[in-house]
Amino acid sequence: MSGRENEISNKDELTWIAGSVVLSDNPPQQLRYWRKKLAVKQADLAKKMSITASVLSDYEKGRRPSPGANFIKRYLQALYDLSQSNEKSRVETQIVPTPVISADAVQLNQT
């Protein structure tokens, strides 16, 4: 897949997530749901967005009024960017298991 096709796919995915947030009966709950689903820490997302974690928490818990479309767009873009970098880091640091010799093989060598 070319970079352009990948970019379109990413945009489609973000659009779908944004729709699920905006059309939800509880948008703050949806924001939190997607952050957890994409395994992004609240503090990391807040830092990426240049806001405090407490402000982000307030939005996710509905303690602040709706932040508006621009905030949701920034939130989801930052969330998606962090989830992609987390995924790359998980793949790069994945530990390959080493083969384990069975007890039967050890007994054969000792006889």
Image (cartoon, grey):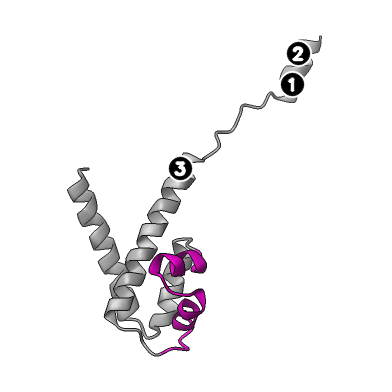
Q: Quadrant of residue 62?
A: bottom left
Query: Which of the two discs, 3 and 1, sits closer to the camera?
Result: 3
The residue tagged with tag 3: helix, strand or loop? helix
Instruction: Identify the disc placed on residue 91.
Output: 3
The residue at 45%/70% (across/down) is: 46
Mark closest to the chain's N terminus, 2 or 3:
3
Classify 95 as above or below 46: above
User: What's the CA distance linking mark 2 and mark 3?
Assistant: 37 Å
Q: Main secondary structure of the magenta part?
A: helix
Residue designated by label 2: 108
The residue tagged with tag 1: helix, strand or loop? helix
Q: Is residue 32 magenta?
A: no
Q: Residues within 10 Å of mark 1 (few under 14, many from 20)?
A: few
The residue at 30%/83% (across/down) is: 68
Boundaries of the magenta span: 41-64
Q: Position of residue 24 (x, y in %)?
A: 35, 81
Q: Position of residue 106 (x, y in %)?
A: 75, 18
Q: Position of residue 14 (x, y in %)?
A: 29, 65
The residue at 59%/33% (across/down) is: 97
User: What's the CA distance linking mark 3 and mark 1?
Assistant: 34 Å
Q: Residues within 10 Å of mark 3 (few under 14, many from 20)?
A: few
Residue designated by label 1: 104
Q: Are marks 2 and 1 in contact (CB under 8 Å)?
A: yes
Q: Quadrant of the C terminus?
A: top right
Asked if residue 98 lies left or right of residue 51, the reply is: right
User: What's the CA distance linking mark 2 and mark 1?
Assistant: 6 Å
Amino acid type, label 2: Leu
